[in-house]
Amino acid sequence: MTRDDPRERDGRHRDQSEDATAFLPKVDRPAPAPPRPPLDLPWPDHAAPPSVSEQAPARPRQPASPPPAWPGEVRPSSPGDAPTAFIPPLGDRRERHRAGNPAERRRGEAARPAATGPADPGATALIPAVSRPPVSPAALDHTALMGAVPPVPDTGDGDPAGTPAEPPQPRRGERVVQLRPEQTGEGYKSVYSELTRPTIGSRLRTIVRGTGEVLITFGLVVLLFAGYEIWGKAVIVDAHQNDLSSQLAQEWGAADPTVGPTTGPSAKPKPPAEGKPVAGLYLPKFDKHWVVVEGVSPDDIRYAPGHYPKSAMPGQVGNFSVAGHRIRATFWRLDELRAGDAVVVETQTEWFIYKVYQQRIVKPYQVEVVAPVPGKPTEKPTEKLLTLTTCNPKFDNYQRLIIHARLDHVQAKTAGRPAELEG
């Protein structure tokens, strides 16, 4: 193999008889550490440990035979040739740390007691005396990072800064109550006893409050009753009026139209029974229509206007008088009728059209307004009149509202509805 041979330049093609680690750089091994001096401990004389020379010779330990080498393994010839030979052996970590730290070394020397005086014959003579370490400044606690509170400056008015200020005086209308119980001659008094103790003022306030609640409740009841009288009754009256209209239509339809009138004298018609429908009453100005029943008792006129039993019938000479309640369902707006307004009465075969000529207010005991001649009960009637009566004023009954009307003309039902109802 020549010098120019590339295998010569490549170390992998060297002779196998050479050392396999010959191409690695040499590692400088550190010098062995000097032996450490013996520790100078303050052992008592009688309890001093025996010297190394006086100790019994230690039994030599037979070195363990190394395990057999693997095929191709190259082992160092001596222990010094191991790869970790340059690492210094580990000693006593505590002593090494103390030797490298001056503060620890000084603390150990200070903690070493002086061997003065006779030895303690007790069993604790073997334990060295422990001296406390020097007092160090106090360690920082969790409030050490907080800033110091500066002192309150003196205001110069003679009041020291540490004196607590007086509590503010309560304003007008305010009351200051102690939250904590305070001791009195009768014992401890709490804030609740001060606020809940009944007084004359508290009793008066309770009475006034209860009276006000009762009055408010009574007022609500009155309002509910008034609402029922105004709007609630209207629904009930309308329902009963529908029933009365059906009854009146059945009575009028029951008559046989094929039976002609007799030539002899006609008998006086028999008056209807109380509570039975008599005729229909229309007020075109208000677009209102009711069925008039016989009788003016509270039960008769509860849901419909009532005909005075001793007054004339519709279209007859005399005074056809009708009474009704002053509610929204019946004669609520009767005071709005004026002279010339029409009042229409319907019977089985004819329409009677009356015209208003007078309106007045009288006392409840002035019943002569429904006489055959209004205001003149002793005179004989010569006209065909109509009178409507109701309570006055609204929501009260200490007066009576009277409407007088006079018959204007008559129209047969076969001719259709009158013009007053069509407008």
Image (tube, rainbow, N blue to C red):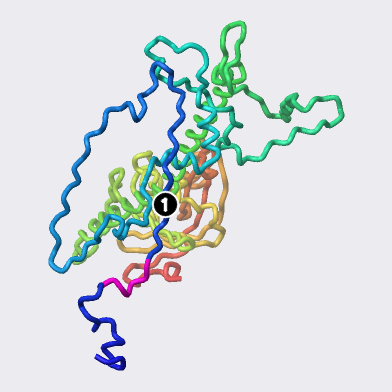
Q: Residue at x 36, y 27 (%)?
A: 51
Q: Is 16 contained in the magenta span?
A: no
- Would you place residue 291 above or below residue 206 in this image? below
Please state if 123 lies on the left or on the right of 340 as rendered.
Answer: left
Residue 416 spot, x, y in % from top left: 35, 71
Residue named by callout 1? 329
Residue at image point 36% right, 48% down = 89
Question: Principal SS element in the magenta part?
Answer: loop
Q: Which residues are magenta?
A: 20-26
Say which residue appears at 28% left-offset and 71% top-offset: 21
Q: Residues within 10 Å of mark 1 (few under 14, many from 20)?
A: many
Classify residue 397 as left or right of residue 261.
Answer: right
Can the viewer see residue 203? no
Relative side of 272 to 358, left or right: left
Q: Of all residues shown, which one is farthest toward the top?
A: 185
Question: Secondary structure beneath disc 1?
Answer: loop
* Residue 134, placed above or below residue 29: above
